[in-house]
C-alpha cells in the first residue's frame, strides 16, 4: 500500500470479550486481558486495511478462577499446547461511512477457520497529547465446536451446560505508530 500507516492496539483502551450461554438460560461473559495487534491502512482510509491480532489464551478471565483454569485445560483452549488465539490475514471492507466487515482467519487450538465480523468505525481523533487514535467496535459469532472446543456436560433435564455459539465483542482503540 502506498502511504501506508501502521496502527497498534492500545491495550489500555481496548477490551476483548466473549459471551456464551450457560444451561441455555443465562449468559457467562469472559474477557482476555493480554493481547496485541496491528493494522496497516492506506493513510486515514481503513477500507482495505490489513489486520492481525493475537490473544494470550492463558489471560482468560470469567471472574471465576476454577472455571478459568478449566477453560485453560485440554477440555477447552489447551493453553499449554496452544498459548495464543490468532486472527491473521484480516482485511477491512467498507460497507458505509462507519461500517465495515472484517474477514480473516481465526486460529484456536491450532485450527484455522475463516470468519467474518461486523465492524463499527468510531472515527479518528487526537488525544490531549497530540497522539492520533482510531476507534472500532467489532462483533461476531463463532461456533466453538468448529475449533474443537467440544467439552460439555448434560443436565438432568437433557440440556447442555455450555452453548455452542460464542458471541464476540471487541472494543479497539488504535494508536498511529508511525508519526
Image: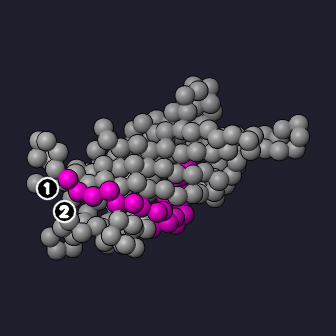
Q: Is residue 166 left or right of residue 178?
A: right
Q: Is residue 105 visible?
A: no
Hey, which quadrant is residue 129 in on the image? Answer: top left
**Residue 23, image quadrant:** top right
Label the magenta part by its dominant secondary structure.
strand
Q: Is residue 31 left or right of residue 146?
A: left
* Residue found 42% across the figure and 36% down from its top: 33
**Closest to the observer: 100 or 2?**
100
Q: Which residues are magenta?
A: 103-125
- What is the x, y in percent for residue 67? 62, 30
- Which residue is disc 2 drawn over? 5
> Residue 165, how many percent across, how many down?
65, 53
Placement of the C terminus among the 4 image quadrants: bottom left
Element at label 2 = strand
Q: Are marks 1 and 2 in contact (CB under 8 Å)?
A: yes
Are there few (<14), some (14-19), or many (20+) residues within 10 Å of tag 1? few
| x then y, percent, for residue 96 | 37, 72
Residue that numbered label 1 is attached to: 178
**On screen, 84 above or below 90?**
above
Q: Residue at x 26, y 63 (%)?
A: 40
Q: Sort mark 2 into few (<14), some (14-19) or many (20+) by Cα contacts within 10 Å.
A: some
In the foreground, 2 or 47: 47
Residue shown at 39%/66% (left/top)? 99
Where is residue 112? Give x, y as percent: 53, 61
Q: CA distance from mark 1 to mark 2?
A: 7 Å
* Residue at image coords 52%, 51%: 168
Amino acid at each position: 500500500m502506498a502511504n501506508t500507516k501502521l496502527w497498534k492496539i492500545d491495550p489500555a483502551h481496548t477490551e476483548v470479550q466473549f459471551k456464551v450461554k450457560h444451561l441455555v438460560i443465562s449468559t457467562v461473559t469472559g474477557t482476555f486481558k493480554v493481547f496485541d495487534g496491528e493494522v496497516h491502512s492506506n493513510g486515514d482510509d481503513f477500507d482495505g486495511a490489513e489486520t492481525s491480532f493475537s490473544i494470550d489464551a492463558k489471560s482468560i478471565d470469567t471472574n471465576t478462577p476454577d472455571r478459568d483454569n478449566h477453560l485453560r485445560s485440554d477440555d477447552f483452549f489447551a493453553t499449554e499446547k496452544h498459548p495464543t488465539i490468532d486472527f491473521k490475514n484480516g482485511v477491512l471492507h467498507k460497507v458505509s461511512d462507519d461500517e465495515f466487515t472484517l474477514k480473516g482467519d481465526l486460529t484456536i487450538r491450532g485450527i484455522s477457520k475463516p470468519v467474518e465480523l461486523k465492524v463499527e468505525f468510531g472515527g479518528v481523533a487526537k488525544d490531549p497529547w497530540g497522539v492520533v487514535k482510531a476507534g472500532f467496535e467489532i462483533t461476531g459469532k463463532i461456533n466453538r465446536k468448529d475449533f474443537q472446543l467440544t467439552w460439555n456436560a448434560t443436565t438432568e433435564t437433557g440440556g447442555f451446560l455450555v452453548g455452542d455459539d460464542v458471541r464476540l465483542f471487541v472494543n479497539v482503540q488504535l494508536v498511529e505508530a508511525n508519526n
